[in-house]
Image: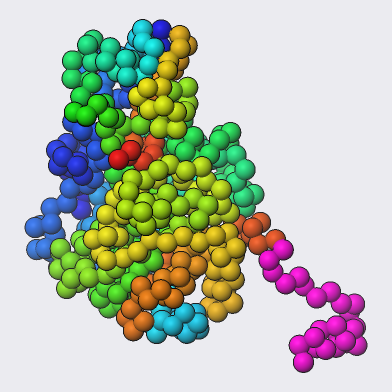
Amino acid sequence: MATIRIPTPMRRYTNGERLVTVEASTLAAAIDELGRRFPGLRERLVNGDGQLHHFVNVFVNEQDVRTLQGLDTPLDERAEVSIIPAMAGGAPAW
Amino acid sequence: MAVERLRCRECEAEVPAGPVYVCERCLGPLEPAYDLEALRRLPLRQRIEAGPRSIWRYVDLLPVPYDPVVDLSPGYTPLIPAPRLGQRLGLRRLYIKNDATNPTWSFKDRSVSIGTAAARQFGYQVLACASTGNLANSVAAHAARAGMRAYVFIPAGLERGKVLASAVYGPTVVEVDGSYDDVNRLCAEIGEEHAWAFLNVNLRPYYSEGGKTLAFEVAEQLGWQVPADVVVPIASGNLLVKIHRGFQELAAVGLVDAATVRVHGAQPAGCAPVSAAFKEGGAIRPVVPRTIAQSLAIGTPADGRYAIAAVRASGGRIDDATDEEIVEGIRLLAECEGIFTETAGGVTIAVLRKLAAAGALDPDGVTVACITGMGLKTADHLAGALAAPVRVRPSLRAFEAAVLARVS
């Protein structure tokens, strides 16, 4: 189960939960699963073209996914995913 | 004027003012929403000119009220004519805005003063920041001044001068194994777990307004005129964006006629994601920094996209300088004008020189180069680049033989 850390501005979609575990083999699958469990959350993370929004940075095991394989980045059982608003953690990926 | 609301820069949704920094609707950045109509009705120029000789003279245009408990009197730094450097570069009216004279010797005191006032207003006990050095110095000093605890986070391997200039105020200095971008991510995660005032994270909407005061001062010191060209170093890009915004706000409230200033950006070649995207016209691609300008070593600049937009809208340019050119820039400013700046200032002067040579600056208009920090903090990088002292025995004959023979 990968663990996903939800930032404060998104916790209203997760009923206040800050750590969510999902069964998923890639980041994209994890985001799909988040969207199924917490309606509205997927749209906060990815746009209509299925790309990460400008203001979202995602890290898998402390690595920016833009330096890995983006949404195709694989997740193993112990993967830790951090979602961080870009204003705190870097440049928008546009 | 204390603002009552913050507004999303992207979707323009508004929320009540508080220690929040991203829009819940689109995750865009929140900024203070000023009542420009009300400001236009105030006798602003009189109120400013009657104010203290610090950034707090512009309190009407800042997001929090004046707080004497945190005041180290930042800002209102000298705007100095630089005729000798100007002559070298072919610029007839060159000025240096010398922010190295701030309380902790960098422009960060402007932002930290405002951010600390906001932190106290919101009831925080602990100040914190992710920093490449200068911000940590300023946060540590302001926490000491305000009687607050401080945790400052820096990447391992910073210049010794910058580490000591934080430690002396008694904060907890946390050295993170990694780059500034790692430090920044860690701080965002810590900020989610601890109710600390991270000045450049959860208090960013207030903190980053400090950059505007540089533009306010330049205009006031020029007799309420805007310069033709301004050259600003880019790390996160926030300072450049706020200087541009500051000139626009002055025009919006009627303190200057029009914000016709061209804003130019300067990056070190070893960390130039914004400069590269500006030149190529594409997206900002993160880089792994390799530069002596450690205070500009941000590989994923948070405001890079806005910095490019501001530079383009104003008709400016962005360029970059190699480590060698940075050291030359430091020496040039010191030798021509008697001002010793840190490596970031060397970047600014090196890029100023390139822009002047390329004809990107108005040679007859007022050009302002923003010197954002002081040289002793990064003196390590000058090792080997300067003439060694001439050593003599304490005798007149030895002096004449060793020293005078050399210069005559």
Q: Position of residue B147 (x, y in %)?
A: 46, 41
Count of marks placed on residues: 0
Where is B33 relative to B228, above or below?
Answer: above
Give the x, y percent position of residue B255. Answer: 19, 70
Residue at image coords 17%, 37%: B16
Relative depth, front residue between B127 and A27: A27
- Left or right: B243, with B125 as reference point: left
Q: Does residue B147 appear in the picture of this structure? A: no
Instruction: Answer left or right for A63 relative to A57.
Output: right
Quadrant assignment, res B263: bottom left
Q: Which residues are magenta?
A: B384-408
Q: Identify the residue at horizontal 28%, vertical 12% (top origin).
A: A33
Image position, residue B377 (x, y; %): 59, 56
* Residue B375 in the image: above or below residue B131: below
Q: Is residue B290 visible?
A: yes
- From the viewer's side, name the closer residue of B172 and A3: A3
| Residue drawn at the location 30% of the way across and 60% of the way down | B311
Determine the residue located farthest toward the bottom in the rendered image: B408
Q: Using the image, determine if residue B308 lies above or below residue A54.
A: below
Q: How is the image coloured?
A: rainbow
Quarter of the rendering containing residue B249:
bottom left
Left or right, residue B165 beside residue B57: right
Viewer-nearest residue: B264 or B77: B264
Q: Is residue A61 magenta?
A: no
Above or below: residue B337 compared with residue B298: below
Q: Quadrant of the C terminus of chain B?
A: bottom right
